[in-house]
Image (tube, coloured by chain):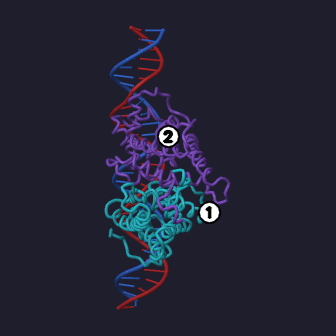
Chain colours: A purple, B cyan, C blue, D red
Amino acid sequence: MPPQHKILPSTNERYDEVLSVAARLIARDGFEKASIRAIAENSKLSQAGLYYYFSSKEDLLYQLQKHTFTALRNSLAARLDPELSPEQRLKLLISNHLEFFTKHMNELRVCAFEFQKLIGKYYEDVQVIRRDYFRIAHTIINEILDKKWGDSLRRPDSRRLTMYLFGTLNWIHMWLDTDRATDLDTMAEEIADMVLYGIARGDTK
Amino acid sequence: MPPQHKILPSTNERYDEVLSVAARLIARDGFEKASIRAIAENSKLSQAGLYYYFSSKEDLLYQLQKHTFTALRNSLAARLDPELSPEQRLKLLISNHLEFFTKHMNELRVCAFEFQKLIGKYYEDVQVIRRDYFRIAHTIINEILDKKWGDSLRRPDSRRLTMYLFGTLNWIHMWLDTDRATDLDTMAEEIADMVLYGIARGDTK
DNA sequence: AATGTTACCGAACGCTCGCTCGGTATTCAT
DNA sequence: ATGAATACCGAGCGAGCGTTCGGTAACATT
């Protein structure tokens, strides 16, 4: 675990507000352009005051990503029932992801697009949770492939398929209008249907 | 068209080298962290010398994106044969995109992830080409949907489906190893098959 | 031979950045 | 009552940023 400036109780209003403000500004302006000064002002803190809660700007980004990604993974893990078919679990993963999107758009955006800005131990520590989330999806997709392809030589690569799905999910930040995010249930079904059954007629293949 | 510092002949070695170096550094470090100093040094130019070719850092990003995106769209347009079925045209779009990826990875990455850094007229000018590229994909997908869904109420939204596809394509920059990019043909087929026919058995739907 | 254009460069300006330092008011424990 | 911990703040440092300015050598034109 990377060095943390201070161990704080998780119920700290100021701390949470700073994270929320930082997520908003970093999501809008990018990590480099979102200055400590701007984050402090919008949190009603002085710049120096910020450093009571975070040891550096990178530490702030790290806390934000770790907190968000952990919440996303836990939200999924809590819902996944091993009794469900892999197809149903895939739909659940997608709708969980999109639901999380509506609730924590800024935070998720920062996780998706700024995670390469972390280096060294900060990076690796977040990467652990990231990989965990990936592994869940990867396992589901592998089970789906088992049913259709078995050990066939034409079986597609499950890791890449998982990446294709995450591409679709993460790219939503780039085009979906903040306010019009009402069709999330429809979208979750659309994406699941596309990945599972395709958009073209099966018999013309 | 945004103000251009200078109209230069397109066959200018120095100019091309600066664009190539800038693409490499911006792809690696991001637009803000890739400094004019670093770009100049790697181009064997002084900082001041750079401003002979570009009026500002934003102008440099604009030139890079416009040049790259135009080449991508033209490459696709030249290959698209209206005689082909929409399914075949979709495969062609995907393999053209991935082939362009292998040849101009840095440039494409900058187009995908830094296009929001342009503002005003710079942004809109690139957006025109971007939209053109989108429209081509959108049209193809609409034709595919026509065959399966017609006017059915359950027909999925073609714009969103197009965005899902671009998400998959653009996200490849985030995970594909530079050197190991040998399976591009396999990947193009994988993506096309996933989008067109899905990864699960059709009869268990 | 004189003039203009092209293709640069060294130096520096003004600004913003992340971060630190010394201090302070408030709360809490002894 | 006193000392320590908590939760900050004002001011400023040094570094790096994009950009500009005044110059200049090489070449082309007249």
The three-letter amino acid code for the residue at tag 2 is Phe
User: Badge 1 local density, few (<14 within 10 Å), some, or many (20+)?
Assistant: few
Q: Position of residue A83 (x, y in %)?
A: 56, 37
Depth check: give the residue in front, B58 or A154: A154
Question: Vertically, is A156 above or below A99?
Answer: below
Labels 2 and 1 in the same subunit: no
Q: Which quadrant would residue C26 be assigned to in this image?
A: top left
The residue beneath circle 2 is: A69
User: Which quadrant does the N terminus of chain B fall into?
Assistant: bottom left
Residue A59 marker? none
Please say if the residues under marks 2 and 1 sit with CB atoms less than 8 Å apart.
no
Instruction: Decide if residue A178 is on the left or right side of residue A147.
Output: left
Q: How many marks?
A: 2
Q: Position of residue D17 (x, y in %)?
A: 43, 55
Q: Position of residue A33 (x, y in %)?
A: 40, 49
Instruction: Decide if residue B181 is on the left or right side of residue A107.
Output: right
Question: Vertically, is B156 above or below D4?
Answer: below
Residue A34 visible at all: no
Question: Vertically, is B150 above or below A125?
Answer: below
Chain letter of disc 2? A
Circle 1 sits in a helix, a strand or a loop, which is it? loop
- Point 52% across, 38% down: residue: A80
Circle 2 sits in a helix, a strand or a loop, which is it? helix
Depth check: give the residue in front, B24 or B140: B140
Residue A74 visible at all: yes
Residue B183 marker? 1
Task: State the CA–CA distance, disc 2 to disc 1.
Answer: 31 Å
Depth check: give the residue in front, C5 or B71: B71
Instruction: Decide if residue B16 is on the left or right side of residue C1.
Output: right
